[in-house]
Image (tube, helix red, strand yellow):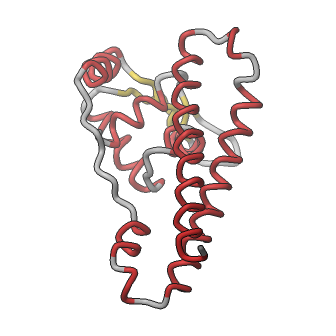
Amino acid sequence: MALSHALLTALHEAPCSGYDLAKKFDGTVGFFWSASHQQIYRELTKLEEQAYISAVVVQQSNRPDKKVYEVTETGKDYLREWIAQPSTVAAIKDDLLVKLFAGNLVDPAVILDELEHHRSQHQDLLDTYKSIEQRFFADTCQLDVNRRYQYLTLRQGIRLETEWLAWCAEAIESFLG
């Protein structure tokens, strides 16, 4: 997947400015695809050059003008084609697992601290996802098609974080046991 796909996905629901898109990205697609705001703005320029998005300049008083971006039909076609292509399982890139693999080089307390740190981060993410679930998906029986897809994405995030927490507990116990 390319950043362009993630941005078009975040933008396809409603037009928004680059700033608003970056904020929206951080709170949605950004949970499973990271990009700096600088990368987002660079990619928006490319998407506009490729006619996948169009922009309208909105004048503002007491502030610089802003561009509001919208996915074009060409952009929707591009996104549809990408969605229809089979995905491959993404390779795991995780610093913790590499550190653990060579963990015998340090005192076990160093690894335990790192495991505790990760457990805390995964707990925070799980809490965030559950909060999103309660706030936006309280009644899953009433979800329209778009919200159902979003909910399935959130459920996978909840499952991943739950599994990470279980694995962290197992790894910590192996040192303490």
- Tell me the residue at 34%/43% (across/down): 3
- Tell me the residue at 51%/30% (across/down): 153
- Tell me the residue at 69%/10% (across/down): 141
Give 99 or 8, whichever is nearer the viewer. 99
Q: Look at the picture and state if 70 lies above or below 109.
A: above
Q: Look at the picture and state if 37 lies above or below 25.
A: below
Residue 47 x/y as whole percent: 31, 35
Residue 124 x/y as whole percent: 67, 55
The quarter of the picture where the N terminus appears is top left
Image quadrant assignment for residue 123:
bottom right
Left or right: residue 126 versus residue 93 is right
Residue 151 x/y as whole percent: 59, 25
Query: What number of labels is visible?
Result: 0
Q: Look at the picture and state if 61 lies above or below 35.
A: above
Give 119 or 73, whichever is nearer the viewer. 119
Left or right: residue 151 versus residue 100 is right
Left or right: residue 130 versus residue 66 is right
Left or right: residue 124 versus residue 21 is right
Give 96 or 86, whichever is nearer the viewer. 96
- Tell me the residue at 52%/66% (across/down): 171
The quarter of the picture where the C terminus appears is bottom right
Residue 39 x/y as whole percent: 39, 53
